Amino acid sequence: MGGRLSLAAAGLAVVALLSWAPPASAETRVSAVCGVAAGGSIRVGGSISIICTPRALLDLIHEQQAFRDAQSERIKQIATDLNLSRCEAEELVAAVAREPPPPGEIGEWLARLARERRSRPAPDQDRVREDGIAEQGSIDVERHLAVGIPPEDLEELMQQVRRVDERYLARLEGLASDLRFSRCATANFLAILGQKEVPPEQLSDKLTEIANGHLKLVERLRALTTRDPKIAELRARATAAIAGGDYETADRLLRDADAIVSRSAPAVSPVMRDKAQIVAARAELERAQLRYMPAAELFEEAASHFETAGNAPDQARYLDLAGGAYQDAGLYTRAQTLYEEALQCSENHQDEVPEEAVITILNNIGGLYFAQSDYTNAIDRFSQALQATRCGEGLDAGVQVALEAASHGGLADAKVTINDFDSAEDHYAQALSLTELVHGGDHPTLVPILTNWAWLETIRGEYGRAESLYLRAVAINDTRDPAGPLEAAATQNNLAGLYYSLRRYDEAESLWTRVKGVYEAQLGEDHHATLVVSQNIAKALMKRGKLSEAERLYDHALAVWETNARKKRQVEKTHLVIASLHAGLADLYVRQHRLDEAKKKYDKAISLAESQLGDDEIVEQSLVIAGYENDRAVVYERLGDLEAARDDLQHALGTMASKLGEDHPDSGTAASNLARVLMRLGRLDDAVPLYRTAITVAERSQRPPLVASRSRNLAKVYQGLGNLAEARRQLEKTRRIYQELGPEYAERLEAVEGELAALDGEAGR
């Protein structure tokens, strides 16, 4: 049974830095949860290596669509007249266009080529010929057959084919060769990607999914056995149609086979196994076309037929597949129901269902809970899967290691979200060790584990270890054959974020510039990933005092985005990228003391964020808005509008505490900022518990500098309340931390010594 879970359940978490505007005493945040500049983690790349970049692949898809739109009726007519699939008709037209006959003989040439192809000795009916044309069973072309469209239309068609041959058909040939599929199958893959309007950064992943679905579909059909000769013939013809990329014909043939079985099989007949297999093949066909809802419904139907036929292993398998398809369709509640039914079926038939199937289902349920931010239940299911794997007696050794690694990876990612960092680190170490055991020390499957583990170490302040993990991931990507430029760029983007956190701004800017070059070449300058990196470069430039250069980058990114929004080139004016760019400009304006303009930019960013995301992403939406409110409060505070700053911070803190928990670092930042504003409003008693909470959060996340600064501010509150003993305790705590942090904090240590001396003088009076 195939699993859905990758070794790192959350994928690559790209560190894109949030916009902020820090006054001397205010705190800002860098968060992977609500701090991604693009409003979500960037996951780019996939396992299929293709000759052309995603940008070039997208161009190829658009050219295919344009060619087919322009010649749709003519190609369809030729296919009908010659009894060919659409793709076969395109192939014949292309062949004639390359070696054109006299204009009046084009129709006869097409018919003759069709006859020649049909009269070749038939290979195994399930194979695809070297020239990419699949056999279509017993279909024959009679000698008297002719093409029934006017000769002048045929000549016009040939001329257009010759014009696009180098630009589209030749590149299609290269892609087909690279993927090792027939040209017709490859053209069908492109058509599916175009119909679904897949974003450029997902093209490789979705192409992988379609290609794998194609192979599974052919495998499923070849394994379909039946005693009915009519069904056997339909199966063979459907297999050949799929091999040639003709999914429409395959779907019709499978429906015909389904109808035959439905008419002849009683509800409890053993023939229901045939029915189940045919329905399962139809489900695979839908999924191969990225049509998840109909696939899910058919997988569910197949499971019910396997139940009738008394086949528990396949019943559990297809319930699991139905759950996965519903999850892909975004119906999480339904997906959970099907996963749980698959698990129950497995438990009811323990002697029949393989152990690895049960463990895979448990991991899949854990991944589903994780996707819904239900981390407690995710941890529970991943733990059950891990325990079952360790206790498994009949598992193949390689399978056991891979399943255990998947459970550790899921547990690690889930533990990070609840701030259980020590446990998360242990699980990452286990996942890495087990994956190395299966694949070796330089395999690409290690990269997500290394990247997520490095992010954990960044959160904990273990920057040296984080850098080491990132560099290892970068080295693996650099030695891949063929290299995966988008995957490598994603890891380098994270490493640049670490350098930024370490104040190594030159290195961060240099690395981000390299990443931007890759994204521009692969995805285009108007893609959200490119704009995010442009924003990060601007932040590094701001830190280096190059404000005018940073402003030019922001203005250029906004201009690109708005221009393409007007052209409707797969962008939306209200996308979170543009909200983030407005927030970035707000940061810049704060540094330039243009506070009124900064406030307007934060207003715009919040408005865009509020209008963008749907109900299924409401958690992310609310956290992005809360982050911008935290930053806008800093501007209000500088403008002297403390009540507005208080309102923003109270709302931001409420959102963060409810969505992330009170002990999350971002909640601690908002609590600290709110305490400072309340202190300035004279509400000292209200500030005390907020500062204490913020200090506890900083201690749990192991961030000594934050503990020190918050303790120092709390001392000022206690001093204002007249509690000089508690004020001294907080200042002494701050002094110890600065002493341990070393020379870099010498200036702050000296200031604290002065504050202690002043406090002693006040106590003496």
Image: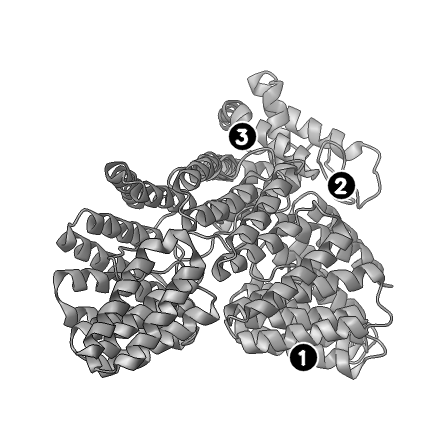
Label 1 is placed on what type of residue? Glu
Residue position marked by numbered label 2 in the rendering: 135
**On the rendered image, what quadrant is the N terminus found in?**
bottom right
Left or right, 209 with respect to 153, comes to right
**On the rendered image, what quadrant is the C terminus found in?**
bottom left
* Disc marking residue 168: 3
Distance of label 2 from label 3 (alpha carbons): 24 Å
- Residue drawn at point x = 67 percent, y = 36 percent: 481
Helix, strand or loop at label 1? It is helix
In the orientation shown, which residue stands out farthest toward the front? 764
Helix, strand or loop at label 2? It is loop
Depth check: give the residue in front, 125 or 502.
Answer: 502
Q: Quadrant of residue 387?
A: bottom right
Left or right, 387 with respect to 692, comes to right
Of mark 2 and mark 1, the one earlier in the sequence is: 2
Of mark 2 and mark 3, the one earlier in the sequence is: 2
- Judge depth for marks 1 and 3 and give the one in front: 1
| Residues packed near mark 3 inside 10 Å, few (<14), some (14 to 19) or many (20 plus) | some
Label 2 is placed on what type of residue? Glu
Q: Quadrant of residue 679?
A: bottom left
Q: What is the x, y in percent for residue 52?
A: 56, 33
- Judge depth for marks 2 and 3 and give the one in front: 3
